[in-house]
Amino acid sequence: MNSLLRSTRFVAALVAVLLIPASLNAQAKPAAKAPAAAAAQVQTGPGGWIKEFGTMWTFDAPPLAYWKGRYGFEPTKEWLEHVQLSSVRIPGCSASFVSDNGLVMTNHHCARGCITAVSPKDTSYQDAGFVSASAKDEKKCPGMYADQLISTEDVTAKIRSAVTATKPADQVEQRDKAINDLQTACQSAAGMQCQVVTFYQGGKYSLYRYRRYNDVRLVMAPEEGTSFFGGDPDNFTYPRFDVDLTLLRVYENNEPFKAPHFLRWNAMGAKDGELTFVVGNPGSTGRLLTMAQMDYLRDVSYPLTLAGYKAQIALYKELVAQSEANKRLYENTVFGLENSQKAVTGYNAGLIDKNIMAKKAAFEKDFRARVMGKPELAAKYGKAWDNIAAAQKELGSFAIATAFQGFGGGSNLVNLAAGLVRIPEQDKLADSLRLPQYRGPGMARQKGQQGMNLPIDVSMEKKLLTLQFTRAQAALPANDPFLKIALNGKSPADAAAALLDNTTLAKADARKALLDGGAAAVAASTDPLIVFARSVNAMATKHAMRAAKLNTTISANVELVGQAIYAAYGETLPPDATFTLRISDGLVAGFPYNGTIAPYKTSIYGLYARSAEFDNKAPFKLPARWEAARSSVDMTAPLNFTLTADIIGGNSGSPVINAKGEVVGLIFDGNIESLPNRFIFTDDVARSVAVHTAGITEALKKVYGAQRLATELQTAAAKK
Amino acid sequence: MNSLLRSTRFVAALVAVLLIPASLNAQAKPAAKAPAAAAAQVQTGPGGWIKEFGTMWTFDAPPLAYWKGRYGFEPTKEWLEHVQLSSVRIPGCSASFVSDNGLVMTNHHCARGCITAVSPKDTSYQDAGFVSASAKDEKKCPGMYADQLISTEDVTAKIRSAVTATKPADQVEQRDKAINDLQTACQSAAGMQCQVVTFYQGGKYSLYRYRRYNDVRLVMAPEEGTSFFGGDPDNFTYPRFDVDLTLLRVYENNEPFKAPHFLRWNAMGAKDGELTFVVGNPGSTGRLLTMAQMDYLRDVSYPLTLAGYKAQIALYKELVAQSEANKRLYENTVFGLENSQKAVTGYNAGLIDKNIMAKKAAFEKDFRARVMGKPELAAKYGKAWDNIAAAQKELGSFAIATAFQGFGGGSNLVNLAAGLVRIPEQDKLADSLRLPQYRGPGMARQKGQQGMNLPIDVSMEKKLLTLQFTRAQAALPANDPFLKIALNGKSPADAAAALLDNTTLAKADARKALLDGGAAAVAASTDPLIVFARSVNAMATKHAMRAAKLNTTISANVELVGQAIYAAYGETLPPDATFTLRISDGLVAGFPYNGTIAPYKTSIYGLYARSAEFDNKAPFKLPARWEAARSSVDMTAPLNFTLTADIIGGNSGSPVINAKGEVVGLIFDGNIESLPNRFIFTDDVARSVAVHTAGITEALKKVYGAQRLATELQTAAAKK
């Protein structure tokens, strides 16, 4: 299975929304008006909580009044500190210490790199799973580290006072220098990693100090058939039956790290209705987006993205249907695209929900009224919304042109040709005047790519380019200048063939020669793809530059909105996710689904059921260990469960703890209904999905013969 | 559990749509235009099949060209005759012979009356299940019969030739007499039941001759906890885990009937992708409805119905939340209402689906063009659509008045008071001028009800009446004459209390006295409810009579449309369901659901899973026999499965057979996605749900100790 596609899972879900390939897609509608704000009003709960902003709380501003008001829960300072210090962040994911011997729990899909890297030549631990028989079998993960958040410090004032200039560009420079200075000073302490974290898009700055552990070893990982049981089809859904677990161990001086803080293992796990907390590092949310930004996503960006997925899925499905060989080649591409389609459709579901959008509109109205009600806020921030709206509207006005009058469509050769034409041109410009991908270190990356030996499937490239031309033909007027150049009277298929049958650019040498030859070589080239790229470049670059300028305006004003939100509401609103440590509260709960009810937990019975119900075919095939354990495992043991806590990509591997601070679960996904939570938090049917500690315990003992680890968890939990 | 509500299941689903209590509900919108017909065109498949009309074929016009074209399936005349004669119809349901010893298979919910009736005083077979140890333990079902369709005869010409009058009323009388004569002549043969069936709303008439079997005995029935596992929440959904089975036996002369035709048992059951057929008696569909009729349902009728459910659900949920006693009293009412809400929401889902409606509009356009293209058809039928549309529009114009200016809202006492006021008044009128419910035998029923000892919960009545008045207040203008009478300046609760606290009508004697006293007694009564009914009666009756007249116009024109459809398309379109024997084709197939895939079959593992996942609480509690069988039953045995065959209420108990005519399953429900099939057939995600014969076989042997029956099935199947 293609590892790029496989990573289109929960961790990477945030990538899907941030990297919306607007230039790949078609059928944009003109930016329409958002539905009227109805009669919705901003409703505040305990401690000033506004539900739509969710519960991703920072440890330096725990919502004590809200917790007390909503649950009667009053944690001590020690409780919070203990929980914070028991948590660690690993690349792209979250994790936690679960024994005093440095044992760390995270998701299988968070440790994939390590599991693959430590596999011996003749065995894939990814396929076969791995259980270390003893400490000396634990395998060091190359390049892996774990960061433990030691302290945070509000440095807003320090950074603000460093910004004295009046010109925006100078301000940015001063701010970046202040941030850099703070980080460098802090980092000089040995073993520390420091980062200034920007909250509320610039409303608040905090200096986060981490202790970094560099010796992390693989202790136990189930087979991917278990951790990702149900595969792409079941991804983002629940009921679910995955043991998405990896156990790692932190070492210090070649000895297991005696972790002073770790979460005690509760082998009974989460109960229905129980108050729980998720501690981890959510990556990115868009809850502070303005209405205009959300309108743009709904009306312009997502329709283009989804139309692109739809067209590509149809193309690959047709190929898959043609032969068994094609099925092997492209079936996972179909699953991956369908998974992305599922994710974006899910995000969009919130944006097209009138009730959800009415709440968002009510909040924006309240927010703007607060800003306009204070002259100093009004002067600083009052125009930000309209500035964003104007820029989004203009972006929408040429979105179709951006998508189709250029180099989109996923053909690597077309992109490489475009790069060869653009590199000499962009090289001559000042950095800030370049297209975004050629700024700073981007130029070197672009050049480097041309010389790489890339595996290029020309026949597939031709199909993708034919598709792009076909879609361009449907989206653009018949007399469009791009169509004249691209098709020149031919059919899309013939035009794509004319370009790709006779190009030499599939070879790295040919590209390298043109790169080295510079503008003159490119101008002299008669390679049909270069000729095409030269002819199209002017209009494509015009759109791209116009879009880049508008996006800069949006960024600057988004920063103002962020500052305004902090000024207007303070920390009653948790900041958008920043891949830093948060604690989110929630209840263990099922939800209405499929015309009936989804249970709060699934069972090991259910795993065997789903496998049997698909005749034990992949991705529902049971690994051999589970086949063998069929008669000995406790079928009634809970396997996965759902809770209302607020999570997103980056939270993968987060522990779910109870009010005593014991681990009762391991976050690994959200249900499909939770996808709209990216923009506005709801918990009617949206749920986080976790592995249940009772299921993990049963699997360790009865399926994986990992009694050693089960005992370690149990023994550590019993310690005072 | 309230048996009325429990019957709100699959069999009775058709009741829900036919008995839409328009007078119970609020918030009608003005009749809006249907979405434009887009570019949809009528698409015909093999044998002229138009998919939207589904596959409920009659045995006298089997779609041989379509079957051959679509599946390469060419049944012999004997195959069809054998299948027809192996099938029987029982009250409200379908069934089939499955052994040469008269064994009959149907659903548990089809035999509920018998199961209850034959239970001994100290045991409920409904709760405990029943397995006859030997033939002599089989228990005769009082009043139960089974009808076997022996022959059909096209009598359209006979009936048409009998209709010679020119006045519509005389025509109806002549037609009814012709039908009656045909039935009587046929029925005179001993043991025969004859019925003239009206197809295409009058396009075709057939005389159906049935052999009736009057001695039907209960052989085996599982516990309701098994047959209806998952209860109302899982009703209309899939994945599903129900053994919705009853085995009956037909006796003749006190001996098991030696059935010459029976379906052979295939204990392996249905396979993924297999061609299958459902043979049974679908009750009622609305696929010939005109656009105007569907618009009315979507824009007027269903919104009123759904608003009524919503309001009542909220009321009962509030009560349930108040105490454990209330929970016991009303929880099943909530489930029942939610089930009806689920059904109507499902029907409506098709009507609000633009793609589905565009297909329907394209068909109507094609249909009307065919009619208008032939002068004789145009003259006869050309105006029918516009006549229906005009009548529906007028009905919509006073739907809110009908719903609220009268006796609606579900208070039995209000209805009884209305009856007392109306009976003397309606008694004086000619039958055809009466309100529909007082016509023919209706009058006697209305009178009879007044003297019955009905269990009336006055406190609940008060809540329902308060709700109705509250909704009336919201729906009607403040100066509405009904509100003046009903509320008279009081709050809805006070007004309801004033009426119900002081009425004597809860007692049958008091009602009987008023009934016997006639108009004079009613006029003299000072009972507050009678006073109220007297004051409201004029306006309520005015609306009801106006609606009745419009409905008569609609019926007459609907009949014309039916005749036109038969004239224009012949039998390439199967007629709407008429609770007569049909054969429907389909493939065994899973479907996309919940963001992932539903498997084509579920397993016994899944039954234990769903029970464990709800902590074995009702309606997911396992009956004792299943608890006991946990370690011996084959968990991988398929339990339920899904297929694309076309079914609806009345098909309950239908066998699913394979191309060899062997039983591979037992229909008992449709998934929630199949509910819109009432109006237009689709099979993208709509599925019929059946019990798998492998699961039945396993349950008989390992759970119910019914080896005798398993052997009977197996032995009969092995016979030549």
Image (cartoon, coloured by chain):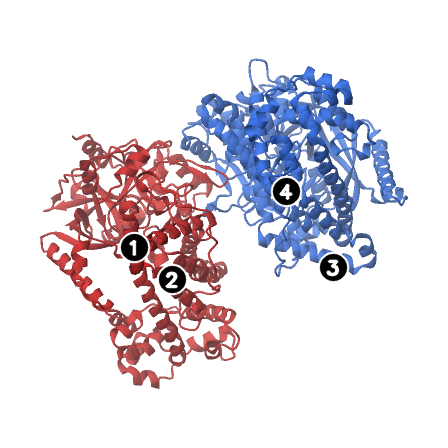
Chain colours: A red, B blue
**Helix or strand or loop: what does disc 2 sit on?**
helix
Residue A564 tag number:
1
Task: Out of B496 and B89, give the one closest to the viewer.
Answer: B496
Asked if the residue at tag 2 contacts the one at tag 1, i.e. Cβ–Cβ closer than 8 Å, the answer is no
The answer to whether marks 2 and 4 sit on the same chain is no
CA–CA distance in space, label 3 to label 4: 29 Å
Give percent across and percent down for residue B537.
71, 31
**Helix or strand or loop: what does disc 3 sit on?**
helix
**Residue A273 placement, left or right of B666:** left
CA–CA distance in space, label 4 to label 1: 49 Å
CA–CA distance in space, label 1 to label 3: 63 Å
Residue at the (50%, 58%) spot, across then down: A321
Asked if the residue at tag 4 contacts the one at tag 2, i.e. Cβ–Cβ closer than 8 Å, the answer is no
Tell me the crowding category of disc 2: few under 14, some 14 to 19, or many 20 or more residues within 10 angstroms, Cα based: few
The residue at which mark 3 appears reads as B369
The residue at which mark 2 appears reads as A386
Q: Which of marks 3 and 2 is in front?
A: 2
Residue at the (43%, 55%) spot, across then down: A341
**Helix or strand or loop: what does disc 1 sit on?**
helix
Residue B301 tag number:
4
Q: Which of marks 4 and 1 is in front?
A: 1
**Helix or strand or loop: what does disc 4 sit on?**
helix
Taking the image as drawn, is residue B668 in sight?
Answer: no
Q: In which quarter of the image is residue B59?
A: top right
Residue type at mark 4 is Ser
Asked if the residue at tag 1 contacts the one at tag 4, i.e. Cβ–Cβ closer than 8 Å, the answer is no
In which quadrant is the C terminus of chain B drawn?
Answer: top right
Tell me the crowding category of disc 1: few under 14, some 14 to 19, or many 20 or more residues within 10 angstroms, Cα based: many
